[in-house]
Image (tube, rainbow, N blue to C red):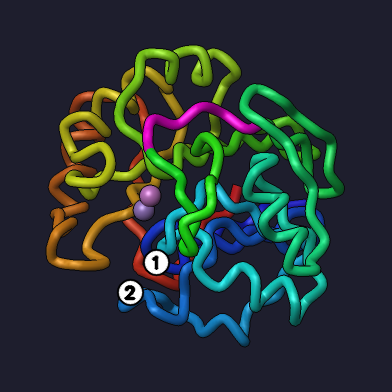
Amino acid sequence: MATTLTWLGHAAFALEIAGKHVLIDPFLADNPAASVKPGAVAADFILVSHGHGDHVGDALAIARRTKAVVISNAEIAGWFSKQGVQTHAQHLGGGHAHPFGYLKLTPAMHGSALPDGSYGGNPAGFLITLPAGNRLYFACDTGLFGDMALIGEEGIEVAALPIGDNFTMGPDDALRAVKLIRPAHVIPIHYNTWGLIAQDPDAWAARVRSETQAVPHVLKPGQSLSV
Ligand code: NI
Ligand code: MN
């Protein structure tokens, strides 16, 4: 069964995997680039990469409405659990077989304080091995780090990488990340939400095409890629 990745704008994705709805970093209500409102998304699981507001976003409201399970690091999962929603805590390097696939939390070079100032543990990326065996890597908010090559060794079909600069990798380092990870397909994210992270994704995609073997996919919010 095909897996569909729909970019909702900024770092938010809606995945449909074997009939399960998986949201990643659902920052929608206050996201000027969002393609949907938080009341209109389906969710069985919500993955939260780190504590910042543009990633925690509407996760709590969506979890309350849908009864979705929030999956994050132990600190963030604990914060959600205190607010009465179902959670599953993991941590960096640890994987677990969920109904949508095997999810491993990967390191990310960033911060993670929660919106109310609570400690948010270490930020994470997500490596999902789909039921068919192919892998998706969401780097989430991070700077470039050499161990992306180790993640690439697992064989990545689709990587979603930030290119916005200022808070995360910019276009140059994201291109270096593609060379380390060597995904078959790459989706740029975390840009053009605000002027501070304005980038030209088509110019970046042209560099990916000319300098790497990866196929870039510049999605508009609401557009999907199927694998
Ligand atoms: Ni962040
Ligand atoms: Mn962010």
- Region rendered in magenta: 105-110
Residue 112 at what x, y percent from top left?
A: 46, 45
Question: In this rendering, is residue 156 above or below 41?
Answer: above
Amino acid type indicated by mark 1:
Gly
Residue 32 at what x, y percent from top left?
A: 31, 78
The 10 Å Cα crowd at callout 1, few under 14, some 14 to 19, many 20 or more, is many
Magenta segment: does it hold 159?
no
Q: Is there any visible trace of residue 86 in the rendered image?
A: yes
Residue at (86% x, 48% y) in the render = 99
Residue at (75% x, 77% y) in the render = 64
Q: Is residue 167 left or right of residue 108?
A: left
Q: Nearer the viewer, residue 85 or 210?
A: 85
Q: Quadrant of residue 15?
A: bottom right
Question: In this rendering, is residue 204 above or below 66?
Answer: above
Residue at (79% x, 54% y) in the render = 87
Amino acid type indicated by mark 2:
Ala
Q: Say what secondary structure mark 2 lies in.
A: loop
Which of marks 2 and 1 precedes in the sequence?
1
- Which residue lies under the disc numbered 1? 9
Figure disc tally: 2
Q: Say what secondary structure mark 1 lies in.
A: strand
Residue at (72% x, 57% y) in the render = 70
- Which residue lies under the disc numbered 2? 33
Residue 158 at what x, y percent from top left?
A: 51, 38
